């Protein structure tokens, strides 16, 4: 059944066909209302034919439905829903602690292409910063175009000289030698100008790409966390690589070809009329045919190149997600399912690439054949004129050459359509990121803060008191995550949050750090509304130790110092000792100068978490957030990490999120969250006396979801 459905989906059947296939294989066809006995008999017959048991049947049913979901979200979307498909988040798009991703885990890849003019103007703005070099390139193009046209025109007197009946052989040879010397000089200038224009245009294009890449990366740093939550890493990386590569290809070659083509076209028209106006008119009459064909194919090509770039981003996103979660895929034996899903996305990319490459590739041959037809017509008319009028053979020869040159600019631009439309589609995607709204800027009267233990000039010292007053928040207006939250954390106290997955615990931490802006209520630090504190200053005074550790390529010392870049080596070592990481670091081959592999893969999970704690310790932030920092380690390692965290929490206002209630028993205040509301609060003993939700969780009467 799996192969059969795969064949149907790859051929692009309609949604109804796919639904019929699903319901037919799962035995839930609502149209026929088959009774229970016949449905069971049908299943047994199918299982008998395919040699599959009931468990395999369920697996096949899941795979079929998953395929339909992938096709609906990432395949030929027009076949599944009209308009803006993939904009509504499905169950896979929802996850606790963050907003839903539109259209599933890879984000909404749909949408109509933007207008070309804004994209072209922005690209020209980046190129325009090298005006002098561009002017020099255009001057070289002008010289190359003039010498190219002049080189063709020199053929007229040379050929007329050879066919003249009133000249001697010696005179013809002398004139031929002069003509060859002149043509050689012209072509030397032409070659030199072509070299210089290519050399400087490459430099201009690379400078422009560097600027675009810097602006894009800078904008990525200023985008809110909400944007990164709703866009996959693979798709964003695709804009840095594939899309910008396409833009660079266009800037290097196409810009010069456009200018050269226009000059060649104008110069050729002038020389054609100067040579023979009848043939010139006949040649120009073929232009509408060329432009109509080029415009028609170009429109289709641009459409499919946009789809190709989007499909490529989806494939990159899926690969990135699969590589990151490879262990999970292997643990649950989903290798075959992952391959099937990848094949669907890859097949969708293949179809769009075939369409894009086909319409982009046929442009050159179509325009070339039309040019040949035009050339044949011109040659026929020219031959008749030579017989019936005084039109010379040299003139006919150069005119046929100009006729070819007349269609060459159009043909060259046609053959560049692959690069043009791929680059414009890529540039649109790049500028979409640049145009995304950044984080809410700091207000003009925003202040800086610092820890009392680490005072700074022009900064307001704080003790670390945190208050949440009537805070209400939702990632989407119709999905409220927190409702009327009130929390008080006195300086140096330990506050714990307990609750089921999706209750809003991590969201509270995100709001304190201003990763998201609250809609109602306010959050105060030492009585100062966090909206009146500069974001950089606020976050530099909040240290975080998360469940998912991330270490950067570099030495152990550099990774710890990431918490505060101006920390001395002595402070780095002291932070490592505070976290309990000093002993294992000393056992590494080069101690603190040991270079870590990608994300610290040469360390154990516990060692990576200890470095994460050391990074928080070196920051000297008065406020500390521990978000399930020990949930992914074993009990022995957990105790080691807890010792490090206890030293880290000393004299710091600490917020703890934990599923293991044993880690929050010594908290000064425990808040129990359910469905975005605080249902209980108190110390460990007080909550046990209430015999409510916390008591049930602690005694094992119920378990956290």
Image (cartoon, rainbow, N blue to C red):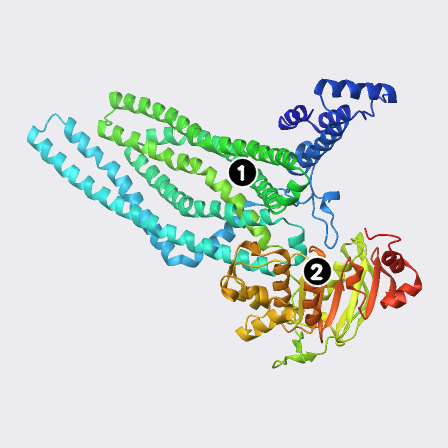
Callout 2: SS: helix
**Residue at left offset 67%, top offset 23%:** 4
Q: Count the marks: how many?
A: 2
Above or below residue 566? Residue 198 is above
Quadrant of residue 177 in the image? top left
Question: Disc 1 marks which residue?
Answer: 305
Question: In this orientation, which residue lies closer to the viewer: 405 or 631?
Answer: 631
Quadrant of residue 368 in the image? top left
Residue 517 showing in the rendered view: no
3D distance between C-alphas at marks 1 and 2: 52 Å
Residue 180 showing in the rendered view: yes
Q: Which residue is the extreme one toward the right?
A: 690
Q: Residue 255 carries which label?
A: none
Question: In this orientation, which residue lies closer to the viewer: 191 or 239?
Answer: 239
Above or below residue 507? Residue 357 is above
**N-terminal label among 1 and 2:** 1
> Horizontal placement of 100 versus 381: left or right?
right
Quadrant of residue 319 in the image? top right
**Residue at left offset 63%, top offset 45%:** 327
Could you tell me residue 228's position as x and y percent?
64, 54
Callout 1: SS: helix
Question: Disc 2 marks which residue?
Answer: 638
Could you tell me residue 217's position as x and y percent?
54, 57
Q: Given contact means CB atoms under 8 Å apart, are the residues at marks 1 and 2 in contact? A: no
Could you tell me residue 379's position as x and y percent?
31, 24
Badge 2 crowding class, 10 Å Cα cut-off, few under 14, some 14 to 19, many 20 or more, is some
**Residue at left offset 42%, top offset 46%:** 255
Could you tell me residue 523's position as x and y percent?
76, 69
Quadrant where the N terminus is found in the figure: top right
């Amino acid at each position: 059944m799996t192969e059969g459905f795969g064949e149907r989906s790859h051929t692009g059947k309609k949604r109804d066909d796919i639904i019929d296939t699903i319901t037919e294989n799962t035995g839930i066809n609502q149209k026929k209302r088959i009774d229970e006995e016949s449905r069971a008999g049908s299943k047994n017959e199918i299982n008998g034919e395919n040699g599959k048991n009931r468990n395999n049947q369920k697996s096949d049913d899941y795979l079929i439905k998953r395929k339909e979901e992938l096709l609906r979200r990432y395949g030929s979307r027009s076949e599944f829903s009209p308009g803006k498909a993939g904009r509504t988040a499905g169950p896979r798009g929802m996850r606790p602690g963050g907003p839903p991703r539109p259209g599933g885990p890879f984000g909404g890849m749909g949408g109509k292409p933007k207008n070309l003019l804004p994209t072209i103007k922005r690209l020209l703005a980046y190129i325009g910063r090298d005006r002098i070099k561009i002017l020099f390139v255009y001057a070289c193009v002008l010289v190359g175009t003039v010498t190219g046209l002049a080189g063709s025109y020199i053929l007229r007197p040379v050929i007329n000289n050879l066919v003249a009946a009133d000249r001697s052989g010696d005179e013809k040879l002398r004139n031929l030698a002069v003509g060859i010397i002149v043509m050689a000089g012209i072509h030397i200038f032409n070659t030199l100008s072509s070299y210089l224009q290519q050399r400087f245009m490459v430099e201009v294009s690379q400078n422009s790409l560097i600027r675009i890449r810097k602006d894009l990366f800078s904008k990525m740093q200023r985008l809110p966390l909400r944007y990164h939550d709703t866009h996959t890493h693979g798709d964003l990386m695709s804009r840095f690589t594939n899309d910008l590569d396409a833009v660079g290809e266009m800037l290097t070659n196409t810009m010069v070809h456009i200018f050269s083509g226009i000059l060649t076209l104008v110069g050729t028209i002038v020389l054609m009329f100067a040579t023979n106006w009848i043939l010139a008119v006949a040649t120009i009459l073929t232009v509408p045919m060329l432009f109509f064909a080029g415009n028609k194919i170009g429109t289709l090509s641009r459409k499919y190149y946009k789809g190709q770039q989007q499909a490529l981003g989806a494939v990159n996103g899926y690969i990135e997600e699969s590589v990151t979660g490879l262990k999970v895929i292997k643990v649950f034996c989903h290798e075959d399912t992952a391959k099937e899903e990848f094949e669907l996305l890859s097949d969708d990319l293949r179809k769009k690439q075939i369409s894009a490459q086909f319409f982009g590739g046929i442009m050159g041959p179509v325009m070339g054949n039309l040019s040949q037809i035009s050339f044949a017509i011109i040659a026929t008319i020219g031959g008749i004129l030579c017989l019936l009028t005084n039109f010379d053979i040299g003139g006919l020869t150069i005119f046929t050459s100009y006729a070819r040159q007349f269609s060459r600019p159009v043909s060259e631009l046609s053959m560049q359509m692959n690069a043009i439309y791929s680059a414009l589609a890529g540039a649109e995607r790049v500028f979409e990121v640049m145009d995304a709204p950044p984080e809410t800027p700091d207000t003009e009267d925003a202040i800086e803060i610092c820890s009392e233990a680490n005072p700074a000039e022009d900064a307001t010292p704080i003790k670390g008191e945190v208050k949440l007053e009537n805070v209400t928040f939702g990632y989407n207006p119709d999905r409220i995550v927190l409702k009327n939250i009130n929390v008080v954390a006195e300086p140096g106290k330990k506050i714990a949050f307990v609750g089921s997955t999706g209750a809003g615990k991590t969201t509270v931490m995100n709001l304190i750090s201003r990763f998201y802006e609250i809609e109602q209520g306010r959050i105060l630090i030492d009585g100062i509304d966090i909206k009146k504190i500069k974001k950089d200053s606020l976050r530099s005074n909040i240290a975080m130790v998360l469940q998912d550790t991330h270490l950067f390529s570099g030495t152990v010392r550099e990774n710890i110092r990431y918490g505060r870049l101006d920390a001395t080596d002595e402070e780095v070592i002291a932070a490592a000792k505070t976290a309990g990481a000093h002993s294992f670091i000393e056992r590494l081959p080069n101690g603190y100068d040991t270079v870590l592999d990608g994300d610290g893969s040469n360390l154990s999970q516990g060692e990576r978490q200890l470095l994460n704690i050391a990074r928080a310790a070196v920051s000297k932030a008065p406020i500390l957030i521990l978000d399930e920092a020990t949930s992914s380690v074993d009990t022995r390692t957990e105790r080691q990490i807890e010792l490090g965290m206890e030293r880290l929490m000393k004299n710091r206002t600490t917020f703890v999120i934990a599923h293991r209630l044993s880690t929050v028993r010594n908290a000064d205040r425990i808040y129990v969250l359910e469905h975005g509301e605080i249902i209980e609060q108190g110390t460990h003993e007080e909550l046990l006396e209430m015999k409510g939700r916390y008591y049930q969780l602690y005694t094992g009467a119920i378990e956290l979801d």
